[in-house]
Amino acid sequence: MIIIDRLCYCSKLRYVNAGEKSAFTVLTLAACILSRSCAVALFVLAATGVLTVYKGGLPLFRYLKLMSMPAAFLLLGTAAIFINISKVPLGAFAFSAGSYYITGSFQGLRQGAELILTALAGISCLYFLSLSTPVTDILTVLKRLHVPALILELMLLIYRYIFVMLKLAEDITVSQHARLGNRNLAASRKSFAAMVSSIFILSIRRSGQLYDALESRCYNGTLRVLPEDHPAKASEVFCIAVFELFLYLAVIFLKLSGGMP
Amino acid sequence: MTQNQKKLIAAAAVFSIAWGICPAANAMHIMEGYLPAGYCIAWGVLSLPFLVAGFMRIKKTLDENRRALTLLAMSGAFIFVISSLKIPSVTGSCSHMTGTGLGAILFGPCTVSILGLIVLIFQAILLAHGGLTSLGANTFSMAIAGPFISYGIYMLCRKCKLSRLATVFLAASAGDLFTYCVTSVQLALSYPSEAGGISASVLKFLGVFAPTQLPLAVVEGLLTTAIVLCLESYAKPELKSVGYLKEV
């Protein structure tokens, strides 16, 4: 139902220590954001691409399709950054529209290009994590970071019930369509509202049942689940450390040399 | 071809391209890696007091009544699910509700801030909507600003004795619109325009996202109204259990 969740359980990197993967993701992400240079972004894009597709065993086509998902935001948002409307034309290009110009400068174009690459590199880091680490593993990492138990418990239950409710929504939608509940816009709007409200009712009812079930199994305020333990391998930690060291040296070097290229 | 015909074709092309891009547009999540590091942290810090308040509120509710835990979890899952469902719209394109307006009306804005944070984390991980670095900014616009405005307007309209339908419609669509404005301001603060500074940049972002967000706000308002109507006629006991129908 949720494609990323399904893929991450099939990943070959699934049983690598979750702490390693999270640390790699966060550090690399930070490096991308801090440097905002095309070189670092391209390097990260290549590294995470290799890791996800080659090491993780994800089909390349799938990966590219996932990478193109946020394209709309990227195009619209970036266009808004480097296209200006002003009375004086700027350097790179200018079209006149009445007494104003639709214009942009080389500075803006470069900023836009850097932004697109940084954002793509960032999303590839995020994909590396979410396509190799199931949510339950991420929760164990968060637990070790001392996130309040209440939040983690809520997250676990919410994660569990997202799928139950999506299945409900799907079933209801199928049966509505079978009865031509989507024959025109007004009808489909009405069916949508009916569907959402019956999901609400069912979920409230189910939450009561869930609590009864928990209580009958001696629930006293904490949900206990057995964590799967996959200890970190020294070789992997070493590789990650070398990679991050190299990356941060590159970031520092680029900053000192004035942010070019 | 005359000049006018050319203009007409160009206009049609622009229109169709705009609609071509629209289908993928969802509620305005700022993408991973889109904000500079300083702004990521700043928005996170700004959201912190609201989140702490929400956390305290939830903790207090749970201390009084442990049963509320599963109810809260279900509400969170409910917000995630309604924000990931495709809603019926004119072009057959897929757009999504934010769901936070409905959440704020049903569960109260403080609770929704924490649930919204969790939903945003899952949206980033499971759907690649938004991201980890832009989590702070997204939390502020979607889980805090939108719900609080929705709830404020909802309360205000009830004071003014407006009809139920109008109240819910106004609250939901205003929450949606406000989220969209806040996101535009967030983007503009990070990327001020070279010609005209921050204010020009705000206008640009507002303009660029208007074609998708304005219809979405109206649709969200209509749907939320319909949902609340349905709920009020079929789900009185359930609404009482989440505290929505207490005073009625």
Image (cartoon, rainbow, N blue to C red):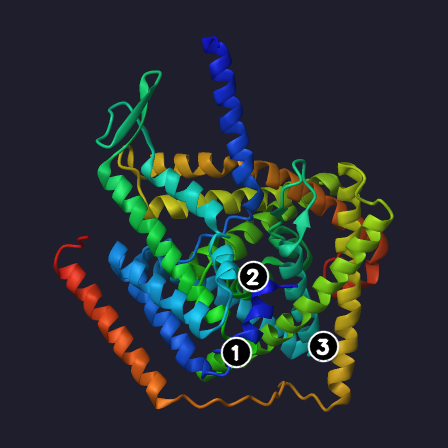
For the residue carrying disc 1, how many other residues have a C-alpha within 10 Å: few (<14), some (14-19), or many (20+)? Answer: some
Q: Nearer the viewer, residue A149 or B51?
A: A149
- Residue marked by disc 2: B116
Question: Taking the image as drawn, is residue A211 in sight?
Answer: yes
Q: Give the vertical position of B161 relative to B133 (above or below).
A: above
- Residue marked by disc 3: B67
Residue B56 falls in image quadrant: bottom right
Marks 1,3: beta carbons within 8 A:
no
Q: Amino acid at mark 1?
A: Leu
* Chain designation of label 3: B
* Chain designation of label 1: A
Task: Give the spatial CA distance, label 2 vs label 1.
Answer: 17 Å
Residue A209: percent from left, percent from top: 79, 76
For this orientation, the residue located farthest to the top is B2
What residue sits 60% from the left and 51% below the top? B98
- Residue marked by disc 1: A139
| Disc 1 secondary structure class | helix
Tag in front: 2 or 3? 2
Task: Give the spatial CA distance, label 2 vs label 3.
Answer: 20 Å
